[in-house]
Amino acid sequence: MNTVNVLIVDDSAVVRQVLTEQLDGINGIKVMGSARDPIFARKLMEKQWPDVIVLDIEMPRMDGITFLRQLMKERPTPVIICSTLTEKGAEVTMQAMSAGAVDIIAKPKVGLKQFLEESRMLLGDAIKAASHARMERVAAGGRASALAAPTRKLSADAVLAEPLHKPLAATTERVVAIGTSTGGTQALEYVLTRLPRTAPGIVVVQHMPGQFTAAFAARLDQLSEIEVREARDGDRVIPGLALIAPGTDHLLLRRSGAQYRVEVKNGPLVSRHRPSVDVLFRSTAQSAGPNAVGIIMTGMGDDGARGMLEMHEAGALTVAQDELTCIVYGMPKEAVKLGGVDAVVGLPRIPGIVIQAPTRLAYMRAAGG
């Protein structure tokens, strides 16, 4: 395994020290240096260019956003933003994701040293994932997975019982469920900003800390013709609306008569995530069956693969983003390996699939399958 060389750029001596100590002990990661601001970082980078940069936002002499934008123009490099959990920080972090950051580490104002020590392995996973990012595909955004203490890997059973596989009748009302992680903010922006107000109702899980999902949804809402907002418990899923799971809770689709609603539910990490794509997809399989379209896009890991198989078995059309257009071809790859994907398509084709929301049979006939 190749060693990932990491540069830490943060004006906090505590952050630099603790991150260096924690990351240097992880197999496959080496901290090549640390700097208190981008000016000092530049001097280190003249000697050796890092594979991944962990970057603070508010620093003396030059802020992280300015430095990030310079990097993306000069030599696109995977950057993980290390941002404090504040409302202001959330807005600025959205700018960083738009500028090309591929991940977020949400650091608390208090208990910082303990947080970084407890999150050691997840920080390492984030860095390794970032090192695989296809930077030629990074135009805006990336993954931001909520950090928590390591836990054993649970399935969707921990939140929602397995589906009974009772076939649901096909209706004209469609719902689209989307799951994504690393690189997903870019991919979601591409898809949602190309949808008309007549697009079917959409439910989304994007791995992201809870303090950032509202700001992320608000930003997409400003850019899109459809309405985009963070989901609230009991919200109806209606045409022209995309509901994004809060970064602190699972998002489930429920059916009440002819209507679809969402349930926002706390619970354990599933596939090491909360919200989990597996949970959303399983609930969609149960509640919508053949009336749903499931789409899994760029992301590290395998969250959503089993849920997509359940959607496939329930009669839904299931679609995976292809390797060529993914920033990280992890989640779609695992879904394909499980055999739950009907079609593998490039990102440019996904908005059209969302707009049409065809049944599986209609899609396969149109594709000549």
Image (cartoon, rainbow, N blue to C red):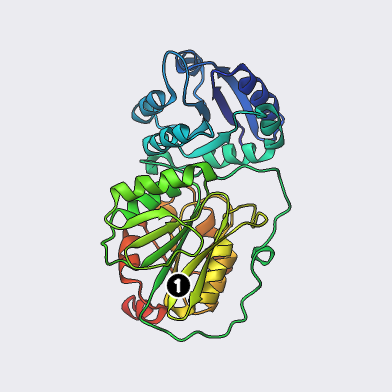
Q: Position of residue 86 (x, y in %)?
A: 51, 33
* Quadrant the N terminus occupies: top right
Q: Residue at (42%, 67%) from the top-left corner?
A: 236
Q: Position of residue 139 (x, y in %)?
A: 35, 41
Q: Residue at (65%, 52%) from the top-left corner?
A: 272
* Quadrant the C terminus occupies: bottom left
- Can residue 340 be seen by looking at this rendering? no
Q: Is residue 72 left or right of residue 133?
A: left
> Which image quarter: residue 10?
top right
> Which image quarter: residue 228?
bottom left
Q: Position of residue 147 (x, y in %)?
A: 62, 42
Q: Secondary structure at mark 1?
A: strand
Amino acid carrying label 1: it is: Tyr
Name the residue nearer the viewer: 155 or 347: 155
Residue 137 position (above or below residue 228):
above
Name the residue nearer the viewer: 292 or 39: 292
Residue 207 position (above or below residue 59):
below
Q: Position of residue 85 (x, y in %)?
A: 54, 34
Q: Residue at (65%, 24%) from the top-left corner?
A: 20
Q: What residue did someone put label 1 on?
A: 260
